[in-house]
Image: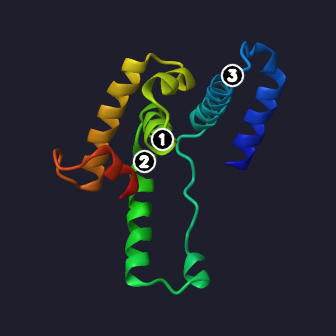
Amino acid sequence: MEDALQEACLKALRAHHQLRTHEPAAAAAWLYRVLYRTCLDRIRQRARPPVEPVDHLDELVEPSRDHADGVAARLELADALARLDPQLRAAVLVVDQLGFDYETAGEILAIPSGTVGSRLNQARRELRTLLGLPPDRITPSQEVTR
């Protein structure tokens, strides 16, 4: 992750002259787009990114039952997200986690805003299946926070 971030920063620095606006929102979308494309390039280079072991967490805290359930749910969601197609995963993360609207997400992902919506719908259906949830009883906010 750190290597991808460093590579994206170098690409952005080298290409900053291509940024045609001084509006902070547009600059942020442009920077996210550079980072997104860098990450996609790295994903294409390897079939699946390695999953970091979390065995060391037991040494750090004595988890309560609620805390352990929360960690397990987050790990389950992370695994389900990792199993999504990278383009579907990117749409979910840009909209549901980072909070961008469809139009800005489309700028970041270099796709029309309507395509953002269709990728989100497809990703949410696949996440429901991967998480073993009923298809009609979950809202988008529940998918990300589960």
- Classify residue 48 as left or right of residue 15: left
Mark with earlier residue (2, 3): 3
Q: Which mark is residue 93?
A: 1
Callout 3 amino acid: Glu
Along the viewing direction, whichever of 139 and 119 lies nearer the viewer: 139
Disc 3 crowd rating (10 Å Cα; few below 14, some 14-19, many 20+) is few
CA–CA distance between discs 1 and 3? 23 Å
Along the viewing direction, whichever of 39 and 60 lies nearer the viewer: 60
Callout 2 amino acid: Leu
Callout 1 amino acid: Leu
Give the SS element for disc 3.
loop
Residue drawn at x 63%, y 32% is 32
Q: Residue furthest front?
A: 23
Q: Are marks 1 and 3 in contact (CB under 8 Å)?
A: no
Q: Which mark is residue 23?
A: 3
Residue drawn at x 79%, y 21% is 16
Colour mapping used in the image: rainbow
Q: Are marks 2 and 1 in contact (CB under 8 Å)?
A: yes
Q: Are marks 2 and 3 in contact (CB under 8 Å)?
A: no
Disc 2 crowd rating (10 Å Cα; few below 14, some 14-19, many 20+) is many
Mark with earlier residue (2, 1): 2
Q: Nearer the viewer, mark 2 or mark 1?
A: 1
Mark with earlier residue (1, 3): 3
Give the SS element for disc 2.
helix
Residue drawn at x 77%, y 41% is 6
Q: Which residue is mark 2?
A: 81
Q: Nearer the viewer, mark 2 or mark 3?
A: 3
Give the SS element for disc 1.
helix
Image x and y of residue 58, in percent:
55, 81
Image x and y of residue 15, in percent:
79, 20
Q: Residue furthest bottom?
A: 62
